[in-house]
Image (cartoon, rainbow, N blue to C red):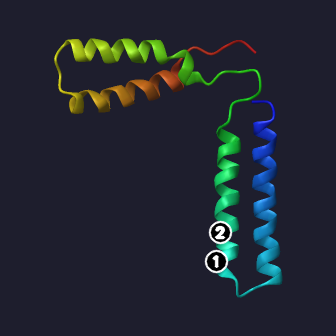
Amino acid sequence: MELKKPLVAVIAAVCLIGAGVARWQWPGQETLQGSLLRLGIVFGALWLALPKPGTSPRIERGAGVLLAAFFLLVFLRRSLLAVLPFLALLGVLIWVFGPRRPR
């Protein structure tokens, strides 16, 4: 994971700089400009979403509670379509308000 986050940041920066250069050098190439700009934005968002080196994503820490809630709801014989929104909400709540590791 140590190599992936900086590599993704470099790819995002190269794509965004490439989009600017393409707009400046070839003003008629909207396809190239748009593609590089979109790739740069997506890689930038991915860079922000990757965890810091040495840490685990919060979803892994709350996966046990999420799995237990899933089995509890299935055991209560609810339909799967009725259970999925509840599980999604529970997963987001665990991710946002879950236990944090000391830094």
- Kindly report the distance in space between the C-alpha atoms of the residues bearing marks 2 and 1: 6 Å
What residue do we see at 70% from left, 50% from top? 44
**Which x, y percent locates residue 30?**
66, 80
Which mark, by number, is residue 19? none
Secondary structure type for disc 2: helix
Using the image, determine if residue 87 lies above or below residue 9. Answer: above
Alpha-carbon neighbours of circle 2 within 10 Å: few (<14), some, or many (≥20)? some
Type of the residue with mark 1: Thr
Q: Is residue 88 above or below residue 46?
A: above
Q: Residues within 10 Å of mark 1 (few under 14, many from 20)?
A: few
In the displayed structure, 88 sits above or below 102; it is: below
Q: Residue 12 versus residue 48: which sits nearer the camera?
A: 12
Q: Which residue does the image show at 76% across and 79% down from the upper left?
A: 23
Image quadrant where residue 79 sits: top left
Which label was assigned to residue 31?
Answer: 1
Q: Secondary structure at mark 1?
A: helix
Q: Amino acid at mark 2?
A: Ser
Front-most of residues 93 and 23: 23
Q: Position of residue 89 (x, y in %)?
A: 38, 29
Q: Please give left or right for residue 28 compared with residue 71 in the image.
A: right
Residue at the farthest bottom position: 28
Find residue 86 and report its image quarter: top left
Residue at x-position 26% and y-position 27%: 83
**Quadrant in the picture for the N terminus:** top right
Q: Which residue is mark 2?
A: 35
Horizontal side of residue 10 vs 47, given as left or right: right
Task: Check whether the beta carbons of the residues at disc 2 and disc 1 lie within 8 A of each other.
Answer: yes
